[in-house]
Image (tube, rainbow, N blue to C red):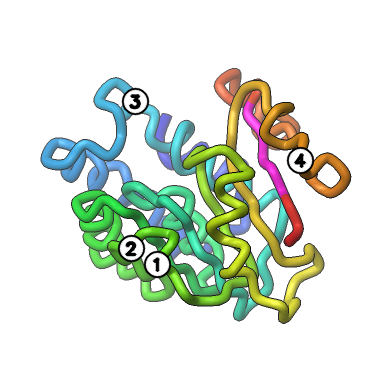
Amino acid sequence: MGAEIIRQYFPELTAEQQRQFEALDALYRDWNAKINVISRKDIDNVYEHHVLHSLAIAKICRFRPGTEILDFGTGGGFPGIPLAILYPECQFKLIDGTGKKIRVAQEVCQAIGLKNCHPEHLRGEDEKGRYDFVVSRAVMPLPDLVKIVRKNISKTQRNALPNGIICLKGGDLQAETRPFHKIVELTDISQFFHEEWFKEKHVIYLPL
């Protein structure tokens, strides 16, 4: 399954965005052979399991131009790089505590000419900036994530959705969302994307 799965769900892409998405397959295959950022058996599913999965966040919030987003624990660049391609007028900072993974994200951004995406080797505890949203993909339990990134959520609102955390997770999330049950929102990704793999996968939104 190639980049056409992205066009299927996001038909309004510009030619430049299509080019950037199409370039990801070869880049991640090449880098993955040197530095393992995607499991070897999963590299053939890079568009469905990694790129499209990342873009589920875009179905929850259409980021307005000028929005600033922190991708916490980005690994090789997910969900930050696909979102940065989709929202060229927003600014993305990608952080991860593993330097070699960040190197992959940096090289991919450079190769596709992604100017609004800034990967940096940094632990979340050491990130001082303020952002409209913190995004992440199954990095740690929600209460632990909230403790670390609460300091990074800006008080200035730019989007229809109030500032907060948007993360991608699968499976039973009752225990980790319980402390926030009055305000947390869980959305099934299978509402947006019909592939079998998205069953029991969710976008969690927590305003902070």
Give the extent of the magenta segment. Answer: 201-205
Outermost residue to the left: 34
* Amino acid at dot 2: Leu
* Image position of 169 (left or right of 75): right
Q: Is residue 29 above or below residue 68?
A: above
Q: Is residue 52 visible?
A: no
In this figure, which residue is indicated by the disc labeled 2? Answer: 122
Q: Quadrant of the N terminus?
A: top left
* Amino acid at dot 3: Asp
In this figure, which residue is indicated by the disc labeled 1? Answer: 126
Give the mark nearer the N terminus: 2 vs 4.
2
Cα distance between the residues tagged 3 and 2: 26 Å
**C-beta proximity under 8 Å, tags 1 and 2:** yes
In this figure, which residue is indicated by the disc labeled 4? Answer: 179
- Tell me if mark 2 has few (under 14), some (14-19) or many (20+) residues whose alpha carbon lies within 10 angstroms of its own: some
In this figure, which residue is indicated by the disc labeled 3? Answer: 42
Q: Residue at x 26, y 62 (%)?
A: 106
Q: Residue at x 21, y 57 (%)?
A: 103
Q: Residue at x 34, y 25 (%)?
A: 42
Cα distance between the residues tagged 2 and 4: 28 Å
Numbered disc 4: secondary structure = helix
Give the mark nearer the N terminus: 3 vs 1.
3
* Image position of 92 (left or right of 193): left
Cα distance between the residues tagged 3 and 4: 33 Å
